[in-house]
């Protein structure tokens, strides 16, 4: 094997449940979730539930998206 060869591990188990995608606009936003749910999701692929009710496995940089208006409204009402 040379330095430029690429290894592909075909035994990897993708932990994304496509059934969690409701097809709505929720994927266009960043969402608020409980802090204690973030690490298990990152490590184990455990789904999280946002304040607005969206359930999914985060897999993208939330800073690239605007905040979900529904999550923001709920969060601000909790203060």
Image (cartoon, rainbow, N blue to C red):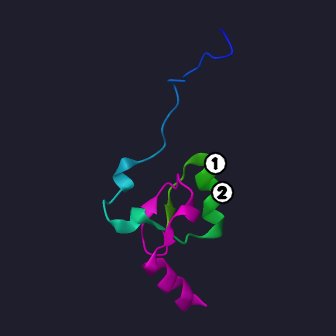
Query: As drawn, which residue projects farthest toward the front?
Result: 4
Does residue 20 lie above or below 76 as drawn? above
Q: Using the image, tell me which numbered label, if any, was put on residue 39.
A: 2
Marks 2 and 1 in Cβ contact (< 8 Å): yes
1 or 46, which is in the foreground?
A: 1
Which residue is at a point 51% across and 25% down the rendered structure image?
Answer: 11
Question: SS class of the residue under badge 2?
Answer: helix
Which residue is at a point 51% across and 81% down the rendered structure image?
Answer: 72
Provide the residue span drawn in magenta. 50-79
Question: SS class of the residue under badge 1?
Answer: helix
Q: Is residue 45 magenta?
A: no
Quarter of the image holding residue 64?
bottom right
In percent of width and height, residue 5 lies at: 61, 15
In percent of width and height, residue 1 lies at: 65, 8
Relative to 14, is 21 on the left or the right? left
What residue did someone put label 1 on? 43
């Amino acid at each position: 094997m040379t330095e430029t060869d690429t290894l592909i591990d075909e035994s990897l188990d993708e932990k994304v449940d496509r059934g969690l995608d409701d097809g709505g606009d929720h994927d266009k936003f960043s969402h608020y979730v409980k802090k204690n749910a973030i690490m298990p999701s990152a490590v184990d692929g455990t789904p999280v539930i946002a304040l607005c009710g969206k359930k999914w496995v985060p897999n993208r940089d939330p800073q690239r998206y605007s905040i979900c208006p529904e999550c923001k409204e709920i969060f601000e009402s909790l203060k």
